[in-house]
Amino acid sequence: MAEVLIKNGVVYDPLNGVKGEKKDICIRDGKVVESVKNPKVIDAEGRVVMPGGVDIHSHIAGGKVNSGRLFRPEDGRKGVEAKTKVCRMQSGYSVPNTFATGYRYARMGYTFVMEAAMPPLAARHTHEELVDIPILDNAALPLLDNNWMTMEYVKSGDMDLLAAYMAWMIKATKGFGVKIVNPGGTEMWGWGKNCSLNDSVPTFDVTPAEIIKGLAEANEKFEMPHSIHVHTNMLGHPGNFEITKETYDLVKGIKPEKDRQVMHTTHTQFHSYGGTNWGDFESKADVIADYINQNDHATIDLGSIILGDTTTMTADGPMEYSLYQITGRKWTNHDVELETGSGITPFLYSGKSPVNTIQWAIGQELALLVKDPWKLALTTDHPNAGPFIGYPIIISMLMSKKRRDESAEDMHKVIYDRAEYCSIDREYDLYEIAIITRGMAAKALGLHEHGKGHLGVGADGDVAIYDMSPEERDAGKIQKAFLNTKYTIKGGQIVVKDGEVVATPDGKTYFVTPECDDTLTDEMMVKLKDKFDRYYTVTYNNYAVQDAYVPNPYEIKAPWRS
Amino acid sequence: MVEVTDVVCSLCGCVCDDITVEVEDNKVTKVKKGACSVGKSKLMGHNRIKSPAIRVNGELKDCSYDEAIKKAAEILAASRRPLLYGWSSTVCEADKVGVELAEEIGAVIDNTASVCHGPSVLAIQDVGLPSCTLGEVKNRADLIIYWGANPAEAHANHMKRYSYVSKGFWTEEGKKAKKLVIVDVRATKTSKMADVFLQLEQGKDYLVFSALRAILYGHADVVPDEVGGVSKKDLLETVEMMKAAKFGMTFFGMGVTHTGARHNNIVNAIQMTRAAHTHTKFSIMPMRGHYNVAGINQVCTWETGFPFAVDLTRGYAWYNPGELSATDLLIRQECDAALVIASDPGAHFPGESIKHLAKIPVIQIDPFPNPTTEFADVVFPVAVSGVEAEGNVYRMDNIPIRLRKLIDSDYPPDEEILKRILDEVRAIKEKEEK
Ligand code: SF4
Ligand SMILES: [Zn+2]
C-alpha cells in the first residue's frame, strides 16, 4: 500500500471550497484518503498546493499536430533535449514531440489534458499519440458537426437518430464528447468555400445554427459528462463577436442533463472581435464578457495569446487558408471525407502589430471581465494562440496589474484606445487561478465526478506543489513557480521534483460510452452502413477504434436521459 | 474453411481494406475479391526465410532466435555509428520499438522515404501540402492528374477505389463525368486512358509546372510555344480543364521526385496546386509506395520531431537529410553496423552504398529473402504483417488502418524481435557499466 502525506502545504482546492488553508493531503493507492498510517512524507514548507491541473482544450496528439511537426523542422529544433535516465528525447516548441508534451505539462503541475479535435476517421492516429504521451491522463473530442450523417439528421429533424449517431461515433472513436468546429463551413471548404452561422450549406440544406442546436439537443439526451464543445463560425474575422453572441443564444433554452453548461465555447479570444476589417479592428471582449456574466448556460476558455512564433492548426480549413493568405507562409490542408477537415500554418504574434496587440489584450480582458471564474478556463488553444508552456505568463499577468502595465508599454499603442486592457484593475488571487486552471475545467468536463481537479476524499492523488509562498506578489517569481513545480504528484507517485521529471508512468485515456437504445441504433445503422458502402474509403468493419489503441482505458457510461 | 472479410492488404500505399479471403488449415487458400494481382500474391504467401541464421565463414548457418538475438545485440552494442534502416513495410508498433532502439544505442534511424518521397517531405517542409483523404477525391474530384506516376501498374486499385474510375456522392457517374490528365515522359498503361496526355522530356517537370502556374495566374503571355516538350496549346487546354473542374486532384509519383530538380519539382507542384486553388478547389498527394511508409514518417515525427534521416547519437534528434540519409552515410563509409528491416537496400541503393553495406555487419529482419540477405550477417525471419500479425499502418493519405491477423505463425512479429534485441542491448550496456 503506497502512502503519501503532503504536510504543511497551503491548499487551494476550489471544488471543495478550500481557499488557501494549511492542510494535510493524504494519499493511498493513488487516491486521496482521510488519513494514512505509514506514509512517505513530503514537506511542502508553506508552499502553494493545488490539485493536478486540468486542460480543457489543447492540441497535443493526432494528424494535424503531427503534420505541424513534420512541416516545421525549424520548430522541432527549438526544443531539443537529450534523453536522460528517466526521460526520452525531446523536441519542439509550439509542436513538441509526444514525450516533451507529457514532461512539460507535468512540470507545470498538469495531470489531465483534453485533446480538442479528433477527426473520427483518423481517431486511431490520435490514440496512437496519446498512448505515447507520458504521465498525462487524457481524452479526445471527436469532430461531429460537418459530418454528412449529422447534417442529414438535422435536416430531417430526427433528433433521436442524431443522438444514436452521436453515441455510435463517440463509442467508435473512443472519444469523450461532441466537438463542433466551424459547423457547415468545413464541409463547404470541400469546395473551397466557407459559410457563416445562418447561411445554408448547399446540398445538405441546413444552417450552422441548426447543426449546433441539433447537436446540443442530441448531447443532452444522454447524461454526458461534457456539454457540446464549440468553435463557432467565422473564427478570427473582424466583427465576429455578433456571431459568437448569437451562437450562445441558440442553445439558451436547452436544459442540460447534468449540473453544467449546455455549451462550452472554446478559444473565445478569436471570437470576440469588433470592427469591419483589420484596419478598424477592435476588442469586443467586454460585450462577450457581459453576455457570459448575464447568462449561465455557456462557459468559455480563453485562447489567450503568447507573443512569438507558433503553429496554428484547426479543423477549420477555410480559416487556416485565409490566415495563410495573410502571411504567405507555408500552408498544409487535409480535408477528411464525410466528416471534417484541417488546416495548418505557422504564425508570428508580434507586439509591434496592432492586430496582434489587440488579440493579445482580448484574451486577458476576457479573463478579467468575466466576473465568475467558474465560467472560464485558462487556455492558449495550444498551439494556436501560443504554446501551452506560456500558461505561467498568462497567470502572472492576471495576478499582477503592474506586470500588465509594464507589458502594455512594449505593445503597439492601439492597446490604449482600442481595448479596455489598461483600465482594468482586477487582479486574480491564487484561488481564482486554481479555478481557471483545474476546478472549472474538471467541472465543465464532468471529470470532478471521476476524481479530477480536486483533492477531496476519493479524488485522484494528483497534486501540484508550486515553489512559492501564497503571499508572493512578484510576477516574475509567480511565472517561474508555475512553469516548474516543486513537486508534481500523479496518482500518488512523484513524477516531478524540483522542476525535473523523475518518473514517467503511463496516463489513462478517458472515454465516454453513451448508452443508446438498440432499436434506434439499428435504424440509424441502415443509413450509416449505406455511407460506408457508397462513400467512405474505409469499410464499416475496419472503422471503429480497436481496444488495442487504448491500453489504459477509463470508461464513463452516459445513460440515456431518464 | 472460413471466409474472412474486410481484410487489409499490406503491400502498397493504397492499403485496400475490403478484401475477402478464404482460410483453411491455417492457410490463405483463396483471395475472393478486392485485391489486385500483387496484393493477392502477398496474401497467398510465397517463399520465406526459413530459420534465423548467422553468417559464419561466409555462409549463413541456421541458429536459434536466442543465438541470433544475442549476436545482433552484440553487433549493435559494439557499434559506434549504427544505422537502422527500412521500417516502411512493417507496422507502427514495430516502428516505435525501432525509434527506442535507435535512441538507446545512439543510431541514425532512416526509412525508405529517403529514397522515394524524401524529396516530397522536403518540399512540404518548404511550402506545406494542401491535401485531403482519398475519399474526398472519390466523392468530389472531377479532374484527376497523375504526374510521374503509373497507377495502372504500380497501385493497381488506386483509380478504381479512389480516383478516376470510382463513384462517389458528387461523382455518381464515375469516369464518364471526369477528366483524366497524365503527365509522364513515356506512354504507359495509365496514359492510354487519359483525356490529355502531356508527354514531357525527361527532367523537364519543373519547367512544365512553372508554365502551368504562370497560365493559372493569368500570365499565359510569358509562356513560350513549347515547354519541356509540351506545346503551349496543350498547356492552355490543361489549365482550362483545371479551372473548369469543381474539384481537381494531382497525384504525383517517383517519376517526378527523383528527376531533374528533385524536391524543387514538388515545391513547384504544390505551388501549382495553390495557383489552381485561386480558381477552384485543388489538392495534391504523393503516391506513397510501401504500405506503411507514411506510418514510419508519422511515428518518427511524433517521437523524434522529424520524419526521416534522424541522428540520435547525441541523445537528442538531429535531422539533416542529405547528410544523414542512409545512402549518404553509407557512401561516406561512416556506419560500422546496420540493421535493415522490412526493406531491401541490397536491391534499391546505389552501388557505392551497397558496397559499404556489404562490408559491415548487417542484421536483417524480414519475412522474405531478398538481395540484402545475400550479405546479411544475422537474419531473422518474422511473421508477415497483415497475414500473420496485426498492427497499425497509415495509408498514403495518412489514414490509419489496422492490419488483420488471418492465420497463426511460428514466426514472431517484427515488434517482438526488436524488443528482444533492445532488452539484450540494455543488458549488455548494464554489464559494461558495472
Ligand atoms: S492496390 Fe496495393 S493495397 Fe490494394 S490490393 Fe493491390 S497491392 Fe494491395
Ligand atoms: Zn482548438
Image: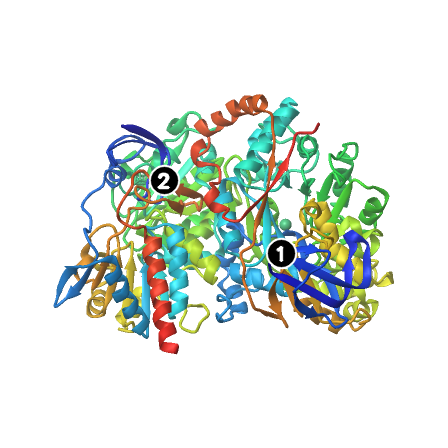
Where does residue A387 sit, x and y in percent of width and height? 62, 61
Query: Between residues A15 and B99, which one lies in front from this camera angle?
Result: A15
Where does residue A279 sit, x and y in percent of width and height? 74, 55
Left of B254 or right of it: where is A464?
Answer: right
Dot label at residue A30: 1
Q: Which residue is found at the position 52% from the left and 24% from the top? A: A527
Total numbered circles: 2
Where does residue A381 sit, x and y in percent of width and height? 65, 54
How far apart are labels 1 and 2 at the CA level?
A: 37 Å
Q: Are marks 1 and 2 in contact (CB under 8 Å)?
A: no
Give the quarter of the image for residue B389.
top left
Q: Which residue is found at the position 25% from the left and 40% from the top? A: B38
Is residue B421 visible from the viewing direction of this image? yes
**Label 1 SS:** loop
Left of B274 or right of it: where is B103?
Answer: left
Q: Which residue is found at the position 45% from the left and 61% from the top? A: B306
Q: Quadrant of the N terminus of chain B?
A: top left
Q: Residues within 10 Å of mark 1 (few under 14, many from 20)?
A: many
Q: Amino acid at mark 2?
A: Arg
Residue under label 2: B404
Left of B290 or right of it: where is B236?
Answer: right
Query: Between residues B434 and A476, which one lies in front from this camera angle?
Result: B434
In the rendered image, the vertical position of residue A339 relative to residue A304, given as above or below = above
**Label 2 SS:** loop
Q: Amino acid at mark 1?
A: Gly
Dot 1 falls on which chain?
A
